[in-house]
Image (spheres, rainbow, N blue to C red):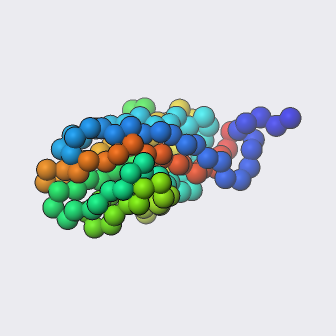
Amino acid sequence: MPLFTELRGALQAVVNLESVGAAGVTGNLPAWVAPAKAQIISAQLVPAAAITADPTNNAVYTLTRHTAGAAAATVATRSWATTNSVALTTESMTLSGTAANLLLAAADTLSVVKTVGGTGLVIPNMLLVVNYRFTGV
């Protein structure tokens, strides 16, 4: 029987993200730890409730890679400045255009960082779906 890290093809990590509270509240939501060297293929969000975008008072979720001893790197983002979200509907996050940001070493951590514009925007609970593949042992 192959080891987990020998699996080929796309794998998926699904994480429940709780709301960070009121509109203006920012936060850092730890989401997942890479079990081995991996490459992020895509990231999606599934909000528990509808979100109405606002160009002035908005929120951004940034999927961020944290490597011990290195600066954090943006993996993917989703802004609610111009585009609404539909409750219980899967939507893609925009992946970083920097290929190196999508590569994780074993034990790298992914977190979702909420930032706000203006007075912010309430973001409900949601699922984070991270699709990845192993890149080596």
In the picture provided, is 129 more to the left or to the right than 25?
right
Residue 27 on image: x %, y %? 28, 38
- Which residue is depicted at the point 57% across and 56% down? 41
Q: In this orientation, which residue lies closer to the viewer: 6 or 26?
A: 26
Q: Residue pushed farthest right? A: 1
Q: Quadrant of residue 105?
A: top right
- Which residue is depicted at the point 47% across and 39% down? 16
Asked if residue 25 shows in the view, the reply is yes
Residue 136 on image: x %, y %? 67, 44
Quadrant location, the N terminus: top right
Q: In this orientation, which residue lies closer to the viewer: 119 or 38?
A: 119
Residue 79 on image: x %, y %? 31, 59
- Which residue is depicted at the point 41% across and 60% down? 86
Q: Residue pushed farthest bottom? A: 82
In the picture provided, is 29 more to the left or to the right than 102?
left
Residue 94 on image: x %, y %? 42, 61
In the picture provided, is 33 more to the left or to the right than 36?
left
Quadrant location, the C terminus: top right
